């Protein structure tokens, strides 16, 4: 089993020879990164289609803000924000690979009926007990993220007994639970959760120690795009002005073993990935 060869319900994600790029579409009015630029359906769909044209391998559609201090929204609103966007994307691009960023089984199921194939759960599949059985039965790939607390509390009191050891233990436990519930091992992707309950120094360590998680035998996704720690390095308070810094961060992650990078600005990220992949492999990737 190769963890970089990830089967989906209707296709395969193959990160064996190159890094995959996930484009972010936040259909929320209060996204930390863009302030709600994708809140209107037509804007979200237009941006998503452009991301595909620019080389995105995956689109991650979310209807619930996860910025520090944010509160959860109700299920009806999350569905209203995300499902029509997914339906329109699939109508235009039937082969688009879509990830639904949700912690709810009902949202995931409705998104899959609309065409999604991946579930990205910031709670690490700990919130809704019905989500894992659905993921198993649907053949979904699962992105298991580490977060300390909830978005509302995650940056208030950051304490670990061991870092990044606590994250490693968290992933070991999650893998055991998910595989024990019948999830195929090759369908699990791990996200250490840069910016989700981590200090500035811990975020830097995660980017520099992606390989620390390799013994777990899973593809690693890294999402440093436009995060506050980059703003601190760059002395840049506006998230949308951190895209060049994001490129440096994803290159660092790739050189340490990241298989997938999650970004807001796809076209330059695709170029950065190509160069990083060529350097890492000492050849141009297919």
Image (cartoon, grey):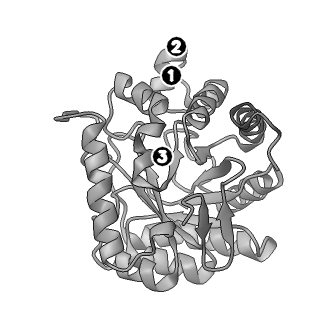
Q: Nearer the viewer, residue 278 or 106?
A: 278
Residue 74, position as x, y percentages in the image: 36, 67
* Residue at the spot of label 2: 235
Residue 21 lies, with reference to residue 276, above or below; the image says below
Name the quadrant containing residue 15.
bottom right
Residue 128, position as x, y percentages in the image: 30, 72
Name the quadrant containing residue 4.
bottom right
**Residue drawn at x 22%, y 33% as measured from the top left:** 158
* Residue at the spot of label 1: 231
Image check: 248 left or right of 156? right
Q: Please tell me which of labels 3 and 1 falls first in the chain.
A: 3
Q: Residue furthest left?
A: 161
Residue 88 lies, with reference to residue 274, above or below; the image says below
**Residue drawn at x 39%, y 55% as measured from the top left:** 122
Query: Which type of secondary structure does the marked residue at label 2 adopt?
Result: loop
Q: Quadrant of the N terminus?
A: bottom right
* Residue at the spot of label 3: 30
């Amino acid at each position: 089993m190769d963890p970089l060869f990830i089967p989906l319900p209707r296709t395969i994600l193959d990160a064996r020879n190159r890094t995959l790029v996930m484009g972010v579409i936040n259909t929320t009015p209060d996204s930390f990164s863009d302030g709600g630029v994708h809140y209107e359906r037509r804007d979200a769909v237009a941006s998503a289609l452009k991301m595909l044209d620019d080389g995105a391998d995956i689109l991650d559609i979310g209807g619930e803000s996860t910025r520090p201090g944010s509160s959860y929204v109700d299920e009806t609103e999350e569905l209203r924000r995300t499902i029509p966007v997914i339906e329109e994307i699939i109508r235009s691009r039937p082969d688009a690979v879509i990830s639904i960023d949700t912690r709810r089984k009902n949202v995931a199921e409705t998104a899959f009926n609309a065409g999604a194939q991946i579930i990205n759960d910031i709670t690490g599949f700990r919130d809704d007990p019905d989500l894992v059985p659905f993921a198993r039965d649907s053949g979904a790939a699962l992105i298991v993220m580490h977060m300390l607390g909830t978005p509302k509390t995650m940056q208030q009191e950051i304490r670990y007994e061991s870092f990044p050891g606590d994250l490693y233990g968290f992933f070991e436990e999650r893998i055991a639970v998910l595989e024990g519930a019948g999830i195929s091992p090759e369908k699990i992707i791990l996200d250490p959760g840069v910016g989700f309950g981590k200090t500035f120094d811990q975020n830097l360590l995660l980017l520099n120690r992606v390989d620390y998680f390799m013994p777990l035998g899973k593809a690693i996704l890294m999402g440093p795009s436009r995060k506050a720690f980059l703003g601190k390095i760059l002395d840049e308070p506006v998230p949308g002005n951190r895209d060049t810094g994001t490129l440096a961060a994803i290159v660092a992650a790739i050189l340490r073993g990241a298989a997938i990078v999650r970004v807001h600005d796809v076209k330059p990220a695709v170029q950065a990935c190509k160069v990083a992949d060529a350097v890492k492999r000492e050849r141009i990737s297919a």
